[in-house]
Amino acid sequence: MSERDVDTMQFPGHLIRRLHQISVALFAEHMARHNIDLTPVQFSAMDAIAREPGVDQATIAARIAYDRATLGKVIDRLELKGLVLRTVSPSDRRARLVALSRAGETLLAQAIPVAAALQPKILAGLSTEEQDQMTRLLAKATRDIEDMEQSAAQPV
């Protein structure tokens, strides 16, 4: 099989990237339609903060699979919007603890149903059963890769 016989457009990585692009566009469109000014990353960060108020930025970054520098910029923007509050950790002055502000709690409560309603649209070409199966398979693939990465990172 030559290199040209391989259909790179059917590689799982390519298809996942395209689906991600479509998902981001749908998210932006639906949030704008509801006058909610949040990106998918901001939404994920706020959701992680809501689940664990007072969490440090490094933990948030790990929870949503972003590097700490990028997450720091995301938190900066959320803070400028008045959606999060940052404090210095009393146990580690280098760490910043983050919690949602009242405005952040309100906005997240508005955004969650909008995000939930658009999820079926991301896989609209699939039956409900296929959507459920795809979600299970994506979760399994993600878990397996994360487990392999954690194992590879362990010292021997």
Image: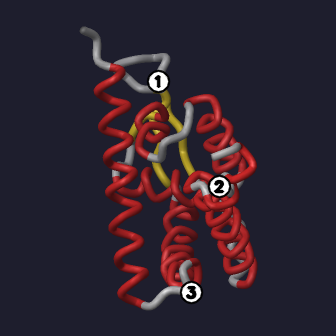
- Image point 66% across, 52% down: which residue? 6
Mark 3 surroundings within 10 Å by alpha-carbon count, few (fewer than 14), some (14 through 19), many (20 or more): few
Q: Residue furthest bottom?
A: 127
| Residue 151, image quadrant | top left
Tell me which amino acid carries mark 3. Answer: Ala
| Residue 123, image quadrant | bottom right
Front-most of 155 and 6?
6
**Residue pointed to by mark 2:** 14
For label 3, the SS is loop
- Image point 37% across, 23% down: which residue? 90
Q: Is residue 152 left or right of residue 156?
A: right
**Disc 3 vs disc 2: Cβ atoms closer than 8 Å?**
no
Real-space Cα distance between discs 1 and 2? Answer: 37 Å
**Residue pointed to by mark 3:** 124
Q: Residue furthest left?
A: 156
**Residue pointed to by mark 1:** 95
Tell me which amino acid carries mark 2. Answer: His
Front-most of 135 and 86?
135
On-image quarter of the C terminus: top left
**Disc 1 vs disc 3: Cβ atoms closer than 8 Å?**
no
* Residue 115, above or below 152: below
- Image point 69% across, 70% down: which residue? 22
Tell me which amino acid carries mark 1. Answer: Ala
Sequence-wise, the earlier of marks 1 and 2 is: 2
Real-space Cα distance between discs 3 and 2? Answer: 19 Å
